[in-house]
Amino acid sequence: MSRIRRIEVYEYAFTIDNLDQHRAYQPDAKLTLSSFGVTILTDDGSRGDYFPQHGGKKAHLGQVLMAAPQLIGRNALQRSILYDDMKRSLRQVGFIGVSHLDVALWDLAGRRLGVSVGELLGAYRERLPTYASTTHGDREGALSSPEHYAAFAEQCHELGFRAFKIHGWNDGDAREEARNVEFVADRVGDRMTLMLDPASQLRTFADALYVGRACDAGGYFWYEDPMRDCGVSMHAHRKLRQMIKTPLLATEHVRGIEPKADWIAGEATDFVRADPDLDLGITGTMRIAHLAEAFGLDVELHGCGPAHRLCMAAIRNTNFYELAIVNPKARNPVPPIYACDYTDQLEGVGSDGAYPVPAGPGLGVDYDWGFIEANRTALHVFD
């Protein structure tokens, strides 16, 4: 037994240049972001750490603080029952806080055994085909027009990327979105796999249908969360599937394996979304991957980070790693927390259009504790 004796939750802040509060380009802006990380310590000297990237939001933190106390005194190696008990305790608030604690437990197990989490999962990939996933559009000269999006796609192609996902503007203008979809396809569609994610900004079902037909014309690989239902209406998505040809990618905003099963069985999506930061950690993500596999579908991981790469390395039925969220004039707003060569910036892509899978013990990354401590805003301790 490796009994959990202490959990530390670090809050910290960092600043990103040239992005506004919507993560869209704004010259000379200073965007201050908050995030957090989890450390789990056991009575036999084992330790697990997890600091998420885009998945370290304040709302997530609150759930982690709710769930953490119940782990004290429990066996850190019994991840399955800990997952189940935490899930029940957070049943009224959407489960997300299970995610960060679960990933830290996987890191602990790997480091305790001196092996990668990928080895524990049976990973077989060493490099992951990746798509560049843009920030939202702006009116400031970075992603302000179809020409800008196409030029950025070409820039990404020159770096090595062979897939590109558009997040359009926050205005929800269906005609502008459709023009952009078709223009980018005309420019790079013969060289790059293209995806579209309006991020629930299209105002009506008719708007979603209009843009979906533009995706059909452009041969898009998938169409993701287009409508103001915010990706939770099975009926609306099933109807949209019946009226367009482009495959739908849904369930980013549907938590847990059971409702995702309902979406699949209800024929409301073609691809299935999973995210270690949102879908109850590595344990939850792998269960979702197996669920999709049982239905003969592919699962696509949302977001980026070491846990995402390690899961993908062990999943057969998946296609792309998401390098989220990138812009031609700003850095990816992920926290600069690594003391190793791990990166989710654009320049990290290889000539093969792929990113490497971490190979060291646990999650395979070393954190910059000097940076974390220097920028720490709070410390929560449970023992």
Image (cartoon, rainbow, N blue to C red):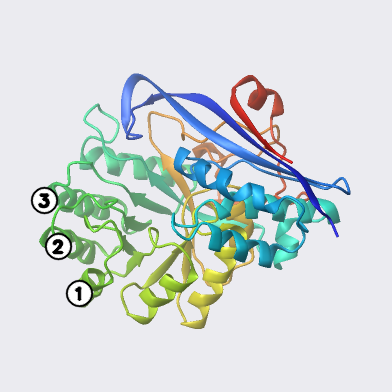
Q: Which mark is residue 192?
A: none
Residue at label 2? 205
Question: Where does the N terminus fall, quadrant-wise?
Answer: bottom right
Dot 2 falls on a residue whose secondary structure is: helix
* CA gap, disc 2 and disc 1: 9 Å
Residue at figure coordinates x 41%, y 29% from the top left: 330
307 or 317, nearer to the observer: 307
Residue at label 1? 239
Report whether residue 329 is seen. yes
* CA gap, disc 1 and disc 3: 21 Å
Q: Is residue 35 left or right of residue 38?
A: left
Q: Which mark is residue 175?
A: 3
Q: Residue furthest top?
A: 28
31 or 190, nearer to the observer: 31
Question: Where does the C terminus fall, quadrant-wise?
Answer: top right
Residue at figure coordinates x 45%, y 42% from the top left: 59
* Three-letter code, disc 1: Lys
